[in-house]
Image (cartoon, helix red, strand yellow):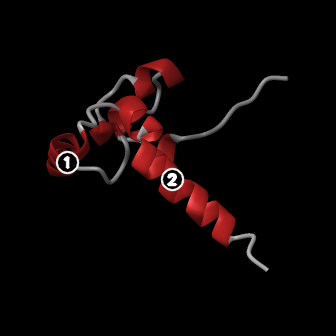
Amino acid sequence: MAVSANLAKALDKAYEDKTVGEILDAPVSAISGVSEGDAALLDQAFSIKTVRDLGSNKYFAVAGVLVALSNHEG
C-alpha cells in the first residue's frame, strides 16, 4: 500500500519538494519554525545536526512516548 503525506506546512519552503531521505539528512532548520539559532542550540546540547538526528534522539523519543501514554490514561 502506498502512503503519501503533505508535509509542506511542516517544512521550510526550500525542502517542500525533497524526498523523505533528503529531508532526514537535512539540517533541523529544514523544519518550519526551527531557526538557525535553534539548530545551533540543539547541536550544542544534544549533538543534533539533522532531522534524522532529531527524530531518533533518545530524549525526544522518551518524551514522545510519555505524551502518547498520557493521552490514554484512564
Q: In this figure, which residue is indicated by the disc labeled 2? A: 62
Q: In this figure, which residue is indicated by the disc labeled 1? A: 45
Disc 2 to disc 1: CB gap under 8 Å = no
Examine the rendered structure and indicate whether residue 34 appears above or below residue 16.
Answer: below
Q: Quadrant of the N terminus?
A: top right
Quarter of the rendering containing residue 30: top left
Examine the rendered structure and indicate whether residue 65 appears above or below residue 19.
Answer: below
Residue at image location 44% in from the left, 50% down from the top: 60
**Residue type beneath disc 1:** Ala
Residue 64 percent coordinates (x, y): 54, 56
Q: Is residue 7 left or right of residue 49?
A: right
Residue 67 percent coordinates (x, y): 58, 65
Q: Is residue 31 visible?
A: yes
* Neighbour tally class for label 2: few under 14, some 14-19, many 20 plus, Cα within 10 Å: few
Residue at image location 32% in from the left, 31% down from the top: 50
* Neighbour tally class for label 1: few under 14, some 14-19, many 20 plus, Cα within 10 Å: few
Q: Is residue 23 left or right of residue 46?
A: right
Quarter of the rendering containing residue 13: top left
Q: Is residue 36 left or right of residue 69?
A: left
Q: Quadrant of the C terminus?
A: bottom right
How many numbered callouts? Answer: 2
